[in-house]
C-alpha cells in the first residue's frame, strides 16, 4: 500500500515543492492549505490529470479544531498516516523593541503551536501502527538567530527542541522525527528582500546560489526513505551557515 503523507502549507513555496516531488513518487498526499485555495486546486487538478492521488484540505493549523478535521479527513480517505511534514509557517520583520504581544502569539501559534497540534493529533495513529516519520521544516534562524526576526527565531528553535524530544520519546514506537532547517530559499516568503541583498547572500554562500523548494523536497524524500536517522536538524543552505 502506498505511503500517505500530510504536507501542511502545501499550496506555495517549499510545501508546493515537496508536494510536486512526492506526488510524482506515487505517494498519497493530503495537501493542506489555509488561504491559497486557488493554488491548492490548481496543484490538485494538475496531479489528478496525471493519475496521482493528491487531496486538498483547508485548515488553519494554528487552530486545534481545524487540525483535528484535517487529520480525520486524512484517515477517512487513506486509513493511515505514514508521514507528517510540518511545513506551514509565517515570518515577520520587526525590531524587537516594536514586537507586540499579539505578534508574539501570532508567530508562535502559526510556527510552533501548529507543530504541537499536528503532531499530537497524528502521533496516536502512528503509535497504533508502530511506524511513522515526522519532518519539521524549521529554519537556520532557529539555530543561529536572526536580527529583526526574534520571535521567528524563537519559534523555529522551539520546533527543533520538540523534534529532538519527540525523537527520543517516539523512537521505541519506530517513529522517526527530524527537522530540516533551510537557509535562504527562493519563495514568496522572501519576496520583500531586495535583489541587492539576494546577490550578497549568493556571494556569501560557498555554492554561490540560493536554494529552491526542490532542494528541500529532495531531503524530505530522503528522510522518508531512510530508516536510521532521527532527532537531527539538517540544515540545507548551500554552505551559507556552517556550524
Ligand atoms: P511561503 O511561500 O510564504 O508559503 C507558506 C505556506 O504556509 C503557504 O502554503 C501557506 O498557506 C502556509 N501557511 C501559513 N500559515 C498557515 C496556517 N496557519 N495554516 C495552514 N497553512 C499555513 O513560505 P515558504 O518559504 O515556502 O516557507 C515554508 C516553510 O519553510 C515555513 O515554515 C518557513 O518558516 C520555512 N523556511 C523558509 C525559508 C525560506 O527562505 N523561504 C527559510 C527557512 C525556513 P496559504 O497560502 O494557503 O495560507
Image: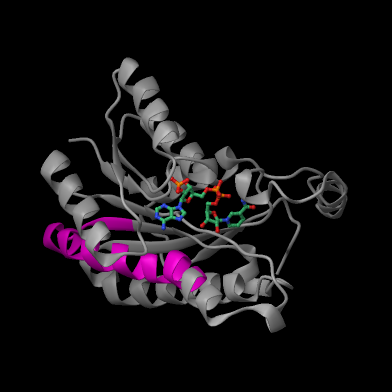
- Give above or below for 140 relative to 154: above
Q: Residue furthest top?
A: 49
| Quadrant holding the N terminus | top left
Query: Left of 16 or right of it: where is 76?
Result: left
Can you give x and y, in whole percent of width and height, for residue 209 in the image? Answer: 77, 43
Can you give x and y, in whole percent of width and height, for residue 177 in the image? Answer: 38, 64
Instruction: Based on the picture, tell me whether residue 82 belongs to the magenta stretch.
Output: no
- Give above or below for 161 relative to 70: below
Q: Residue at x 53, y 69 (%)?
A: 156
Q: Residue at x 62, y 50 (%)?
A: 189
| Quadrant holding the C terminus | bottom right
Q: Which residues are magenta?
A: 107-133
| Color scheme of the displayed model | one colour
| Number of numbered discs | 0
Q: Residue at x 73, y 76 (%)?
A: 95
Can you give x and y, in whole percent of width and height, for residue 119 in the image? Answer: 30, 65
What secondary structure is the stretch in magenta mostly built from?
helix
Instruction: Based on the picture, tell me whether residue 121 belongs to the magenta stretch.
Output: yes
Q: Residue at x 63, y 64 (%)?
A: 140
Can you give x and y, in whole percent of width and height, for residue 151 in the image? Answer: 59, 75
Q: Quadrant of residue 168?
A: bottom left
Query: Left of 4 or right of it: where is 138?
Result: right
Amino acid at each position: 500500500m502506498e505511503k500517505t503523507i500530510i504536507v501542511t502549507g502545501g499550496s506555495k513555496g517549499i510545501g508546493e515543492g515537496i508536494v510536486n516531488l512526492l506526488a510524482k513518487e506515487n505517494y498519497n498526499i493530503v495537501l493542506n492549505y489555509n488561504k491559497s485555495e486557488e493554488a491548492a486546486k490548481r496543484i490538485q487538478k494538475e496531479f489528478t490529470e496525471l493519475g496521482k492521488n493528491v487531496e486538498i484540505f483547508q485548515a488553519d493549523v494554528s487552530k486545534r479544531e481545524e487540525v483535528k478535521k484535517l487529520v480525520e479527513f486524512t484517515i477517512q480517505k487513506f486509513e493511515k498516516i505514514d508521514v507528517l511534514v510540518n511545513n506551514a509557517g509565517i515570518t515577520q520583520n520587526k525590531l524587537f523593541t516594536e514586537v507586540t504581544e499579539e505578534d508574539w502569539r501570532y508567530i508562535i501559534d502559526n510556527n510552533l503551536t501548529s507543530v504541537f497540534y499536528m503532531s499530537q493529533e497524528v502521533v496516536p495513529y502512528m503509535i497504533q501502527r508502530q511506524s511513522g516519520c515526522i519532518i519539521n521544516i524549521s529554519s537556520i534562524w532557529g539555530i543561529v538567530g536572526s536580527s529583526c526576526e526574534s520571535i521567528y527565531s524563537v519559534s523555529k528553535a522551539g520546533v527543533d527542541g520538540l523534534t529532538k524530544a519527540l525523537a527520543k520519546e517516539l523512537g521505541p514506537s519506530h517513529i522517526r522525527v527530524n527537522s530540516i532547517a533551510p537557509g535562504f530559499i527562493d519563495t514568496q516568503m522572501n519576496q520583500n528582500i531586495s535583489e541587492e541583498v539576494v546577490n550578497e547572500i549568493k556571494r556569501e554562500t560557498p555554492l554561490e546560489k540560493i536554494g529552491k523548494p526542490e532542494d528541500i523536497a529532495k531531503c524530505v524524500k530522503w528522510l522518508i526513505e531512510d530508516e536510521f536517522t532521527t532527532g537531527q536538524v539538517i540544515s540545507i543552505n548551500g554552505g551559507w551557515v556552517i556550524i
